[in-house]
Image: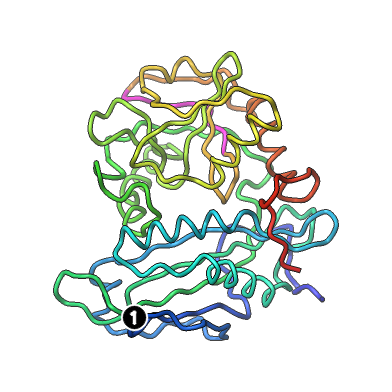
């Protein structure tokens, strides 16, 4: 299969239209079988529920070319389960796990010419999403929905290597207590837009959001979970009912324990203990791990011992091991790699 004529080494992290996308429709109480289509445009009423009341959820997955030339995706069953949980919380009819995984396989295979070659550092990003499409003017859920999955080739999130970030403890809240922080709803990301622009305008790369109830505990950023490394090498991740359960974070914790033999702990992490950690990273689909070098907390500058020049040693081992699994250089746990073609 001939690849598209794309400068793979200079791809950014943006949208490039590919040939096919998958679309399924929910109407009269059931989902149809879904199909691949050419048209990337969506036609809906100006009164569609998604436009009026933000009834929309999404996922993010990547497809890779492995060292031996296969095209694979990483743990799509986990994304399927999270989308189902998100749908139930947003009063949307869940698409089945089987149809979700089939949609991913279909759309990646149909756009295989856009999957970057092995060794380029690039990948094919897959965006499955679902939204209420029929007209709703009173505040209530939609009755008709559309599920779509499109792809776009993307370059490495960090050009020239992952340089440690400078982040700040935010005065804004990402999610409300007992709200929707634990699901991947579009409205959560809308909540973070003002805060991230404000952070950038003030010289910070990201925000650290605290628990909205006591504002004493670390939660996550606008689009990534936190991992901390203690000075004795333990891997710690914050625990909260309003944190999105990141597939990447859960995979990294498994890798830390079962591949690297490290002690792992999911627990409440207090702002007061940030100064005691040796390393910090933000983990998610886009970059796997983004190292953090400095944290600003209202005038207090917390400099992580790992520094501002490169990833800390434990963070680097975690990154290298997980990307090695994804790219086929390291044997994966059973069920983690879904082969497309």
Q: Is residue 231 magenta?
A: no
**Residue at horizontal 32 percent and vertical 33 percent from the top:** 210
* In-image side of 125 versus 326 (left or right): left
Q: Nearer the viewer, residue 222 or 242?
A: 242
Q: Is residue 291 magenta?
A: yes
SS at mark 1 in the image? loop
* In-image side of 76 versus 323 (left or right): left
Quadrant location of residue 206? top left
Quadrant location of residue 95? bottom left
Q: Is residue 80 above or below residue 304?
A: below
Q: Is residue 253 above or below residue 304?
A: below
**Residue at horizontal 33 percent and vertical 53 percent from the top:** 188
Question: What is the count of numbered marks?
Answer: 1
- Label 1 CA crowd tier, 10 Å (few <14, some 14–19, many 20+): few
**Residue at horizontal 63 percent and vertical 75 percent from the top:** 106
The magenta span reads 290-298
* In-image side of 100 versus 272 (left or right): right
Q: Nearer the viewer, residue 200 or 231?
A: 231
Residue 2, x across and y down, in percent: 81, 76
Position of the C terminus, as image quadrant, is bottom right
Q: Nearer the viewer, residue 115 or 108?
A: 108
**Residue at horizontal 25 percent and vertical 44 percent from the top:** 178
Residue underneath mark 1: 29
Residue 249, x across and y down, in percent: 54, 40
Position of the N terminus, as image quadrant, is bottom right
């Amino acid at each position: 299969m001939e690849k598209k004529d794309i400068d793979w080494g200079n791809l950014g992290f943006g949208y490039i239209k590919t040939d096919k996308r998958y679309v399924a429709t929910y109407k009269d109480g059931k989902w149809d079988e879904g199909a691949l289509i050419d048209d990337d445009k969506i036609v809906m009423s100006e009164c569609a529920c998604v436009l009026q009341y933000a009834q929309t959820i999404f996922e993010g997955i990547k497809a890779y070319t492995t060292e031996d030339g296969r095209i694979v995706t990483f743990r799509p069953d986990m994304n399927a389960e999270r989308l189902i949980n998100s749908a139930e919380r947003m009063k949307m009819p869940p698409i089945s796990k089987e149809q979700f995984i089939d949609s991913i396989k279909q759309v990646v295979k149909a756009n295989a010419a856009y999957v970057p070659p092995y060794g380029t550092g690039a990948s094919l990003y897959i965006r499955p999403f679902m939204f209420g499409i029929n007209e709703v003017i009173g505040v209530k859920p939609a009755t008709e929905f559309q599920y779509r999955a499109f792809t776009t080739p993307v370059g490495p999130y960090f050009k020239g290597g992952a340089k440690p970030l400078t982040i700040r403890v935010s005065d804004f809240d990402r999610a409300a207590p007992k709200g929707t922080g634990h699901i991947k709803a579009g409205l959560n990301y809308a909540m973070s837009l003002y805060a991230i622009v404000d952070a950038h305008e003030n010289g910070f790369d990201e925000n650290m959001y605290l628990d909205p109830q006591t504002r004493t505990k670390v939660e996550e950023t606008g689009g990534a979970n936190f991992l901390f490394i203690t000075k004795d090498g333990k891997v710690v991740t914050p625990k909260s009912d309003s944190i999105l359960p990141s597939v990447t974070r859960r995979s990294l914790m498994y890798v830390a324990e079962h591949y690297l033999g490290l002690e792992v702990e999911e627990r409440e992490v207090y702002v007061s203990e940030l100064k005691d950690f040796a390393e910090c990273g933000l983990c998610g689909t886009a970059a796997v791990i983004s190292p953090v070098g400095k944290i600003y907390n209202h005038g207090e500058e917390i400099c992580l011992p790992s520094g501002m020049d490169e990833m800390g040693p434990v963070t680097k081992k975690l990154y290298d091991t997980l990307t090695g699994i994804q790219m086929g250089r390291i044997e994966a746990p059973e069920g983690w790699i879904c082969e497309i073609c």
